Image (cartoon, grey):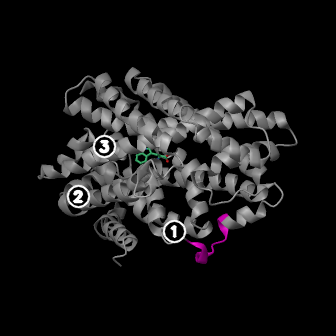
Amino acid sequence: MSDRVNFGSKLGIVLATAGSAVGLGNVWRFPYMTGQNGGAAFIIIYLGCILFLGVPGMVSEFIVGRHSQSNTARAYASFSSNKGWGAIGILGIITSTIILGFYAVVAGWCLYYLGESVVGNLKGDPAFVQSYFQAFSSDPVKPAALGVTFILITHFIIVRGVRDGIERASKLLMPLLFILLVVIVVASCSLPGASKGIEFLLKPDFSKVGPNVFLEALGQAFFSLSLGTACLCTYASYFSRHTKLHYSATQIAVIDFIIALLAGLMIFPAAFSVGVHPDSGPSLIFITLPTVFQQAFSFSPQLGYVISIMFYALLVFAALTSTISMHEIGTAFFHEELMMKRSAAAWILTGVCSVLCVLCSLSVGKAEIGLFGKSLMDFCDFVTAQLMLPAGALLTSILVGWVASKRMVREEFTNFETVRGKSLFPYYMFCVRFLVPVSILMILMHQFGLI
Ligand code: TRP
């Protein structure tokens, strides 16, 4: 078990958890989901999911992880007398492996856009930028190769034990990403016609929300917080006894929401200004951003050039801190449970995810390569975010709220009665026992037409 100590510094670990949360979920998935679901109204429902279901859900995973101090499957198994609960951990490992498979495709796109912006290939009118993305994403080789490259980079960071460096770097780079986002938001909002985009994001029109809006908001909230795959549980197993769980969860959720909102404010004003449809789907940021960098910085193309490179580089970094967290779950499990060497464990994961990544990449925009009328890429996204993550969070809240000993849960929540804000415990208990499971069940049943 000595490897556990090497995971990172005590302070760095909360930062690493935030790094896991902030990623393409905020900058890529949130804007496209918001665009497809009617804008501001979706954001309100999304915020409700984050606050009332996401934060208590995060605290529950933290409690399980910190209590057990071991890998996900063992953590869940040790949390009650019935070892069957370890299945939540296994479900989490499967979910995060699938997510890593398709997430790497998008991370590969970002890597490509980083390279192309350095070379200066992303210049042209909006129609050119759109067809550029189309041609690239349907190429059979390039995006798949870049996706696999991204998984390999993740692999080597995990195996070589350089995560400490990554954590230290994120202390600098995450705030930098934040500042850069603010700069781009200001530039994007100053484009002609941008106010329509701002209105789309901030003025709710409930008549525009799509039929699946609740499940999509819930799935997006869980995806963005890295909730429901025991990923947070793995990180919490390295938390110290003094980490204030409810405080950290709230802090991370707030940061995560603000970054997502900024990403929206970066994309929509520009999209409306240049005539990109808000419901363009997964391609939304890739067909909007190059235009933002050209038009919003037309007063100084050099500045636009530098900002675009910095932005894609930071986005790649943010994606990397997320893929590390997904990879770590399975690696820790194989390493500790099957007594494998850490590098062998990591190779298993890398192999499986790479195959999935190639298949997902080939399927982009092609429903023939897929299941149930969706391309494999869309199918993996749907199954994980909208079914497996809610299921993981639902089971976790049942375990923590109803099965585990209340005294043990209270001790973890209150850091053995030492933490400030321990009077929040009854509210937390209400959430895990009733609010979270009932809401998730109702949303799932609504989706399947049962209520
Ligand atoms: N939350 C990350 C993002 O927003 C993605 C992510 C990392 C994730 N680890 C996860 C999603 C585990 C679900 C489960 O980009």
Real-space CA distance between mark 2 and mark 3, rounded to the nearest whole angstrom: 18 Å
**Quick one: 151 or 172, which is closer to the camera?**
151
Q: Quadrant of the N terminus?
A: top left
Q: Is residue 119 visible?
A: yes
Q: Name the image quarter holding residue 331.
A: top left
Mark in front: 1 vs 2? 1
Real-space CA distance between mark 1 and mark 2, rounded to the nearest whole angstrom: 26 Å
Q: Which residues are magenta?
A: 201-209
Residue with the mark numbered 3:
93
Tell me if residue 415 is in the magenta stretch.
no
Q: Secondary structure at mark 3?
A: helix
Residue at 33%, 28% in the rendered image: 346
Q: Is residue 171 visible?
A: no
Residue with the mark numbered 1:
45
On screen, residue 183 above or below 341: below
Residue at 18%, 60% in the rendered image: 403
On screen, residue 238 above or below 418: above
Residues at discs 1 and 3 in contact (Cβ within 8 Å)? no
Residue extending farthest to the left is: 81
Pinpoint residue 141: horizontal percent, then vertical percent: 54, 31
Residue extending farthest to the top is: 160
